[in-house]
Amino acid sequence: MQVKQLKEDGLNYELEITVGSKEIDQQVDKRLAELQKTVKIQGFRPGKVPMAMMKQKYGKAVMGEVLEAAVNESTQKALADKKLTPAIQPKIEVKSFDEGKDLVYTMNLEVLPKITLKDHKGLKLEKKVAKASDKEIDDALERIASSQKMSEPVKGDRATKKGDIVVIDFHGRTADDNKAHEGMHAHGHHLELGGGQFIPGFEDQLIGKKVGDSVEVKVKFPEEYGAAELAGREAIFDVDINEVREPKETEVNDEFAKSLGLADLDALKKAIEEQTNKEFESFSRMKLKKQLLDALDEAYDFDVPAGMLEMEVQAVFQQVEMDKKQRGVTEELSKDEKAELEDIALRRVRLGLVLSEIGNGQKISVADAELQRAVISEAQKYPGQEKQVFDYYSKNRQALESLRAPIYEEKVVDFILELADVKEKEVTPEELTSEDEDEGSKPKKKASSKKSSEAKKDDSKKEEGKAESKPKSKKSSAKKKAS
């Protein structure tokens, strides 16, 4: 094998690799000999087919296999000999390859930059911390109480009104064929009038009624109703009103705590305190990490592979476009906004290379058990679809690697933080949870001084793309149902 360097321009290299015809012929003969042992051709016993006939019948197919194997093997050897580490998949172009001739091809590649690591011991960082106060706990209690709708029976014989909760039995049927369908009946159902739980018009026809009334409710299912056999059809429901209840203010006491599965109010407050402090610690970690990455971004400046940068720019743009679509924003990004996003992508690539170099130097790795826990955590986000999630990751190596990357990053960050001089500073919960744009964030070299609203994301973590084949998270339907 011969390797000739055609070009070296910064991180870009072009090599011409030649694999001799003699070596290619040896590989072809070796592969044909393997096939000869099992191939079946009429008139010959297995293993006795003449080599000349093997070459005539299977030579072209075997040449294709040998080409692929020869390129892969010679590419790896050339990179090892030249001590080059590709940043992305090299581009291969075959110049010459035929029976009895040398294999000649060129390889264009970008290599990872050589990074001289700095001493991170004693790096001064400030960790902002906050603890849950009585006010935070009381506010959380109030939010929980307001989300728990309590009710009590209406006193007297008054008619129903909007906001009441009626306990009803109902039996429905489609009007054109008088046929009942699944989901069109229930007993003891609690329905808030005006809450919009049922299809339009249903709840309105129960307003002004009393306990013991039987009401014939006539409605029409929406054209885009979830059940195709009911979409756009008129229906009749026979409804019996068994009880009328009205909302009441929730009392935050031991009984309320028990209704949530806690022993008493003190236990509920303790649970809220622990959860709030856990959330505050998450904010502390996020801001400390951001501060650390800002310091690394300031300390390192080197050219990054253009291919890696281009892929990251596309990933950032895609994330922003998805965010805009979800928010209903249709206007295109301005030239300045695109420049800002490109600066963010550049920062991400550079920091990723620095963290990778530090991790490699310390032999930091992600254990299979850690990766398995990450898969389990992902599966828990999709109740009822756990098996699909496990199958997805077991069959999709790229997706599995997307889980490994953030674990690896966190372990490298932990290593640097152990070396750093981290001082804690107690702040208010408002200060800790605020999104101060200037806090610990310095524009990188060519970066703009102000980020676009879509770009105000945590630059310390890459947005990982999700394959379309991944199971979708279950969400409540936006369509109104009768039950």
Image (cartoon, grey):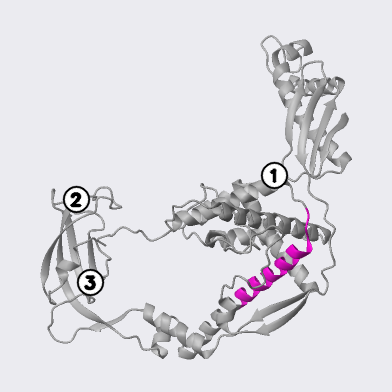
Instruction: Specify few, some or many for label 3: CA neighbours under 10 Å numbering under 14, 14-19, or 20 or more.
Output: many
Instruction: Specify the segment rendered in magenta.
Output: 281-302
**Amino acid bearing label 3:** Leu
Name the N-terminal-most of marks 1 and 3: 3
Q: Measure the C-alpha gap from mark 3 to mark 2.
A: 23 Å
Where's residue 68, x and y in %?
Answer: 74, 29
Secondary structure, mark 1, is: helix
Q: Image check: 175 left or right of 66?
A: left
Q: Position of residue 162 (x, y in %)?
A: 21, 75
Left-right relation of 431 to 223: right
Q: Amino acid at mark 1?
A: Gly
Q: Nearer the viewer, residue 427 or 152?
A: 427
- Residue occupied by mark 2: 233
Q: Is residue 241 visible?
A: yes
Q: Residue at x 70, y 13 (%)?
A: 57
Residue at the spot of label 3:
193
**Image quadrant occupied by the N terminus:** top right
Is the C terminus in the top left, top right, bottom left or bottom right quadrant?
bottom left
Spot occupied by residue 218 in the image (x, y as percentages of width and height): 14, 59
The reply to whether dot 2 and dot 1 touch (C-beta < 8 Å) is: no
Labels 1 & 3 near each other (Cβ < 8 A): no
Q: Nearer the viewer, residue 420 or 156?
A: 420
Residue that label 1 marks = 307
Residue 286 part of the magenta segment: yes
Q: Which mark is residue 333?
A: none
Please tell me which residue is depicted at 24% across the width and 76% down the height of the picture. 163
- Circle 2 packing at 10 Å, graded few (<14), some (14-19), many (20+), is some
Element on which disc 3 rests = loop
Q: Relative to residue 182, is residue 251 drawn left or right? A: right
- The CA distance from mark 2 to mark 1 is 56 Å
Q: Nearer the viewer, mark 1 or mark 3?
A: 1
The first of marks 2 and 1 along the sequence is: 2
